[in-house]
Amino acid sequence: MLLADTLTRTYRNGTTALKGVSAEFHPGGITAIVGGSGCGKSTLLRLLGGLDQPDEGRVVFDGHPITEPHPDIGIVFQEPRLMPWLTNAGNVEFGLSGLPKAVRRERASAALRRVRLEEVGDRWPKELSGGQAQRVAIARALVAEPLVLLLDEPFSALDSFTRSDLHAHLLDLWRESRMTLILVTHDLDEALTLADRVLVMKPRPGQIAASYDIDLDRPRRRSHPAFDALRDEIAGIIRTTATINGLAA
Ligand SMILES: Nc1ncnc2c1ncn2[C@@H]1O[C@H](COP(=O)(O)OP(=O)(O)O)[C@@H](O)[C@H]1O
Ligand SMILES: [Mg+2]
């Protein structure tokens, strides 16, 4: 289990991006973290991934404190961040330093197969569509076979058709692997389509304002009456916390 234990993070400019944030992420769960811009979602994800350290509190993964990136915890960002001087397969292999070349190559093509892109391995990132590039980035995160995948608004730069395609795709990957998924998004439809739990954050300082267990049937249908009701309720929390803090600031 991945555990955020009373995390506080204040940046050098004095911004307290997170204050006393605690959450448990159980194996195989899909948690969406939602909230307006600046409420600390990315900061929380970076701490969970060991890319940054909290000033107070700690991140614990299966009993071990996380103080640096961990091979069992993969991360995907909003932009694919592929290196243009490496082939697509080379970018995926990059997630596997320290193994023999032949092993890296084999595992990279297996990861590209999992995102249904084995045919682009020998080509270059600039030849990919936005959706394909993001799938290669997901393959790069998957190649180390992480138990936890952290995703920071991974689909928000994509058009809505590609986005729903990748939603289905991510759920397929999850069904195959039962990874723990933690998905930051500002898209409430995305959160309610994918997640079994939604954590709603509020800004200044970043804290968890509410948590919802989502037990709607899959595949999720937007037409389900509970879907709209939940979305309106969560949107209301985000709107209210933003306004109150905005007026107080
Ligand atoms: N490196 C940084 N230095 C200073 N302030 C930062 C830094 N990164 C984020 N912040 C501030 O911390 C707060 C939370 O940011 P962030 O975690 O990126 O929020 P979100 O991902 O929800 O938009 C914001 O007020 C943001 O401006
Ligand atoms: Mg962010």
Image (cartoon, rainbow, N blue to C red):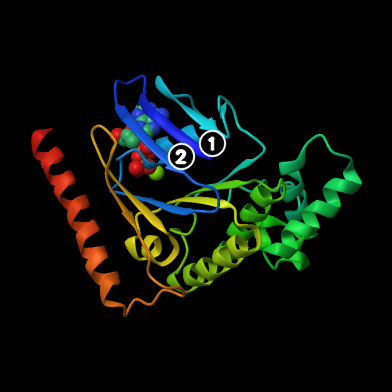
Left or right, 225 with reference to 59? left
Q: Secondary structure at mark 1?
A: loop
Mark linked to residue 208: none
Q: From the viewer's perspective, is residue 44 above or below residue 239?
A: above
Name which quarter of the figure residue 190 lies in.
bottom left
Q: Report x, y in % for residue 202.
A: 25, 42
Residue at image location 53% in from the left, 72% down from the top: 165
Q: Report x, y in % for residue 245.
A: 15, 38
Q: Is mark 2 within 8 Å of ligand 1?
A: yes
Residue corresponding to mark 2: 45
Residue at image location 89% in from the left, 43% down from the top: 101
Residue corresponding to mark 1: 49
Quick one: 10 or 146, which is closer to the camera? Answer: 146
Pointers 2 and 1 in contact (C-beta within 8 Å): yes
Name which quarter of the figure residue 21 lies in.
top left
Q: Report x, y in % for residue 111.
A: 73, 57
Asked if residue 79 shows in the view, the reply is no
Residue at image location 20% in from the left, 60% down from the top: 233
Q: From the viewer's perspective, is residue 170 above or below residue 200?
A: below
Amino acid at the residue labelled 1: Gly
